């Protein structure tokens, strides 16, 4: 006769069930708290175009991080009183950096779409005055700017112009191929881009959310976006050439 006690599956163990119920009751008000309407609206806007999976991943990741930060702050406090200081220091800067970068890239793509079709006035200063163009824009952006040479890829400088931006002046250089195809390089300060403790550059990122696709990167507080109606591989090749000349 076997006198060993029969094992009870965890789901039917009274002690296990009691513990599970207690955990559910813990901070129930916090767990049942609805996601803020502002965050839902932002997510809905970001997911408006389902074919842009990369944008959804960026915004989804930010939203998840912010929700986790809110939950962590509330649970640590044990009451509804907002985020703890450490949670605020993580969530708010990340959110601000993401929004600043999104605004920068969108502005670069819109500027491309606005000025590239121009025949008589595509730029303010033409390539004939390249030295003046570089000096003028460097002074306005308060940073030495170098005009990249894309002749090896078949593109010649058309010229450039000064544009306004959220963090001050921004520059746009335009290049043209013999067949008439044009690309633009958009440069400007991106104060919220560099995370604390990071002074290097980000990896190349591809964007196709705006009127034209672009590759963009951030280096020491400055953003760069190369935009053009080109295949992704061709645009990446040009962006890589620009980056190597400007680093």
Image (spheres, helix red, strand yellow):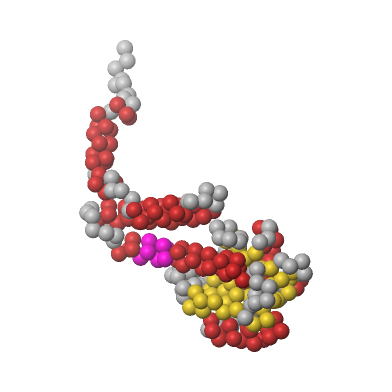
- Tell me what residue is drawn at x 57 percent, y 74 percent: 187
Is the magenta region chiefly helix, strand or loop?
A: helix
For the N terminus, give its image quadrant: top left
Up-down relation of residue 66 to residue 29 (above or below): below
| Residue in view at x 28 percent, y 28 percent | 13
Q: Position of residue 217 (x, y in %)?
A: 57, 67
Give the side of residue 222 with respect to residue 122, left or right: left
Q: Is residue 133 magenta?
A: no
Q: Residue furthest left?
A: 79
In this image, 57 relative to 184: left or right?
left
Question: Could you say which is closer to the camera, residue 138 or residue 20?
Answer: 138
Image spot of residue 163 (x, y percent):
54, 77
Residue toward you, 13 or 57: 57
Q: Is residue 245 visible?
A: no
Residue 142's place in the image compared with 19, above or below, is below
Q: Residue at x 31, y 21 (%)?
A: 6
Q: Where is residue 214 shown, x and y percent of the image? A: 60, 63
Q: Is residue 8 left or right of residue 157?
A: left
Going by the picture, which residue comes out furthest to the top? 1
State the count of labels: 0
The x, y position of residue 34, in whole percent, is: 30, 48
State the residue at coordinates (45%, 64%).
Answer: 99
Q: Residue furthest front?
A: 120
- Quadrant in the rendering for residue 113: bottom right
Q: Which residues are magenta?
A: 89-96
Say which of 159 and 203 sits in front.
Answer: 159
190 horizontally vs 5: left or right: right
Which quadrant holds the C terminus?
bottom right
Look at the picture and state if 143 lies above or below 175: below
Q: Is residue 107 visible?
A: yes
């Amino acid at each position: 006769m076997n006198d060993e006690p029969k094992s009870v599956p965890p789901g039917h163990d009274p002690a296990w069930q009691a513990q599970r119920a207690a955990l559910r009751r813990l901070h129930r008000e916090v767990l049942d708290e609805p996601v803020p309407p502002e965050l839902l609206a932002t997510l809905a806007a970001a997911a408006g175009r389902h074919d842009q999976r990369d944008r959804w991943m960026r915004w989804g990741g930010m939203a998840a991080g912010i929700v986790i930060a809110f939950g962590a702050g509330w649970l640590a406090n044990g009451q509804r009183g907002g985020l703890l200081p450490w949670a605020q220091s993580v969530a708010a800067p990340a959110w601000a950096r993401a929004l600043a970068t999104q605004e920068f890239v969108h502005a670069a793509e819109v500027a491309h779409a606005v000025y590239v079709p121009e025949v008589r006035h595509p730029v303010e200063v033409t390539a004939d005055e390249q030295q003046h163009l570089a000096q003028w824009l460097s002074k306005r952006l308060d940073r030495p700017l170098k005009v990249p040479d894309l002749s090896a890829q078949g593109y010649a400088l058309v010229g450039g112009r000064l544009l306004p931006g959220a963090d001050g002046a921004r520059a746009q250089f335009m290049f043209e191929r013999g067949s008439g195809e044009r690309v633009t390089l958009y440069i400007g300060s991106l104060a919220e881009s560099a995370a604390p403790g990071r002074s290097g550059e980000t990896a190349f990122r591809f964007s196709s959310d705006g009127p034209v696709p672009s590759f963009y990167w951030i280096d020491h507080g400055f953003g760069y976006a190369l935009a053009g109606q080109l295949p992704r591989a061709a645009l990446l090749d040009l962006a890589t050439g620009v980056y190597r000349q400007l680093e």
